[in-house]
């Protein structure tokens, strides 16, 4: 089957490469000539483990191609996926659907064969209805159906998530579209991956509801961590104790500096705006968004306290290890490190930073942070070393070396990756999240 993927960013490129790996003939389309030129040269626009190799293998096999020409790309395609960005709109926080609608209009103007148009982008309830209207007006003479197929990919583990999904959600009321989508995902049936067919509007809401619920879990355990610090309990014990309950589960119960990234911040905000528009407010999600926003800067204050307080912190140096919102990605969107660095700079603290993949994107977002070539370069002369993102490279720092080159043996572990007793035995002042 020929598949066209309109949008060659994170979701479009990963999805397109995986579909090609299943044996489909896939064309990835993007308006950005520089991006397409880089892809032709084998240069990925994003960092995702295994993606470059997956793309190269399928390009070599002739199953994956790239173009800026939408009309050429969608020709003879049975399924055309819309995978363009839906960032938060300035002013009101709604999802900006201008890219989605522009693509729908262009598809409508160039579609010459029956095809299922699939929204892969994360879109609010009712977007499929508008896409259908746009296509109908642009090209009333061609057979098409509009389906919703949200993605559930974790950055850093996207290829595995695509090939071994918990579920595949498809929203359509059209029998023909259902048969086409069954064929698209037929290779995954061998893995017994469950496919859930719903109405289009239900499918659109499932994505937002899932991300909002995970954001609730993260924020809940972060608040429990604050309580643990007050009462002398250990949040890691709390996480294990409640996570062993099958009704709750252990995932997303790791205390830290708050969530960030491309999905949770914008999706929770978009869900709030949708709920307001339909006069069905989601108070829990409102609280989650507010708590998460304040938590990031609170982690900056936690570092300042480890330096001896606001007066003592001025003029001191801090090393931030890990700048991306999570490991195994270069994504800096809403990363906690940004708010932490701002809080430190506002307090007159000199900040040095290092990240294995994210410094190029981090630099313009953190102009007051001196980017370093290695973790130890950042630590040299630092009065506190702060682990912000739990990259594997930071899980086994040479603590003896850290103690030698740092100005003070202070380790602030915002991801709880170290054993407190072992670190303190090395002569460090050790500060963690939600542990005595």
Image (cartoon, rainbow, N blue to C red):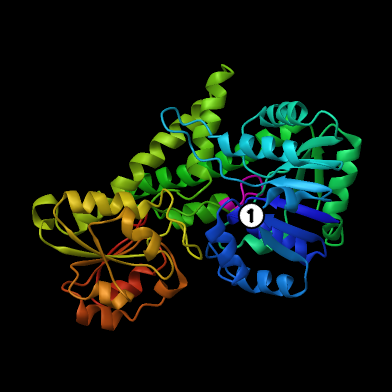
Judge left or right: residue 311 versus residue 246.
left
Instruction: Tally the marks.
Output: 1
- For this rendering, which residue is in front, 137 or 125? 137
Residue 163 seen in the figure: no
- For this rendering, which residue is in front, 122 or 209? 122
Q: Residue at x 41, y 53 (%)?
A: 256
Residue at the top extreme, as displayed: 279
- Over which residues does the magenta segment extend? 243-249
Q: Residue at x 73, y 56 (%)?
A: 165
Name the dominant secondary structure of the magenta segment: loop
Q: Residue at x 63, y 34 (%)?
A: 101
Q: Residues within 10 Å of mark 1 (few under 14, many from 20)?
A: some
Asked whether residue 226 is drawn in magenta, I would say: no
Judge left or right: residue 73 versus residue 234.
right
Judge left or right: residue 404 versus residue 266.
left
- Against 59, residue 348 (above or below) is above
Q: Position of residue 343 (x, y in %)?
A: 23, 49
Q: Position of residue 22 (x, y in %)?
A: 80, 64
Q: Position of residue 68 (x, y in %)?
A: 63, 54
Q: Which residue is mark 1?
A: 68
Q: Quadrant of the N terminus?
A: bottom right
Residue 289 seen in the figure: yes
Q: Quadrant of residue 39?
A: bottom right
- Against 417, residue 111 (above or below) is above
Q: Quadrant of the C terminus?
A: bottom left
Q: Position of residue 13 (x, y in %)?
A: 64, 58
Q: Quadrant of residue 341?
A: bottom left
Q: Secondary structure at mark 1?
A: loop
- For this rendering, which residue is in front, 296 or 56? 56
């Amino acid at each position: 089957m020929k598949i066209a993927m309109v949008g060659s960013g994170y979701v479009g490129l990963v999805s397109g490469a995986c579909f090609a790996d299943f044996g489909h003939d896939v064309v990835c389309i993007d308006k950005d000539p520089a991006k397409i030129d880089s892809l032709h040269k084998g240069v990925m626009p994003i960092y995702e483990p295994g993606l470059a190799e997956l793309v190269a293998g399928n390009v070599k096999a002739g199953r994956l191609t790239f173009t800026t020409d939408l009309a050429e790309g969608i020709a003879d395609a049975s399924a055309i996926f819309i995978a363009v960005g839906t960032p938060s709109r300035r002013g009101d926080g709604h999802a900006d659907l201008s890219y989605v609608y522009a693509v729908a209009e262009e598809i409508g103007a160039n579609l010459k064969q029956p095809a299922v148009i699939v929204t892969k982008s994360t879109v609010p309830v009712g977007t499929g209805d508008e896409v259908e209207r746009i296509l109908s007006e642009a090209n009333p003479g061609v057979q098409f159906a509009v389906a919703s197929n949200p993605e559930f990919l974790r950055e850093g583990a996207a290829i595995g998530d695509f090939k071994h999904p918990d579920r595949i959600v498809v929203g359509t009321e059209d029998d023909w579209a259902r048969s086409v989508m069954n064929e698209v995902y037929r290779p995954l049936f061998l893995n017994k991956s469950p496919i859930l067919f719903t109405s289009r509007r239900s499918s659109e809401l499932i994505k937002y509801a899932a991300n909002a619920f995970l954001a609730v879990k993260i924020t809940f355990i972060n608040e429990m961590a604050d309580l643990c610090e007050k009462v002398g309990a250990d949040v890691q014990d709390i996480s294990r104790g409640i996570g062993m309950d099958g009704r709750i589960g252990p995932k997303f119960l790791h205390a830290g500096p708050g969530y960030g990234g491309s999905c949770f911040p914008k999706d929770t905000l978009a869900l709030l705006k949708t709920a307001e528009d339909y006069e069905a407010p989601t108070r829990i999600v409102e609280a989650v968004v507010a708590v998460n926003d304040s938590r990031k800067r609170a982690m900056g204050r936690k570092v300042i306290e480890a330096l001896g307080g606001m007066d003592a912190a001025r003029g001191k140096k801090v090393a931030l290890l890990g700048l991306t919102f999570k490991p195994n990605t270069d994504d800096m969107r809403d990363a906690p490190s940004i708010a932490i660095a701002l809080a430190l700079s506002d307090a007159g603290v000199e900040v040095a930073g290092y990240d294995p993949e994210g410094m190029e994107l981090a630099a313009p977002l953190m102009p007051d942070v001196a980017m370093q070539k290695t973790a130890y370069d950042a630590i040299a002369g630092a009065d506190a070393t702060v682990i912000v993102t739990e990259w594997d490279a930071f899980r086994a720092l040479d603590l003896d070396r850290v103690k030698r080159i740092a100005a003070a043996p202070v380790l602030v572990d915002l991801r709880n990756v170290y054993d407190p007793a072992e670190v303190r035995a090395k002569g460090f002042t050790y500060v963690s999240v939600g542990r005595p």
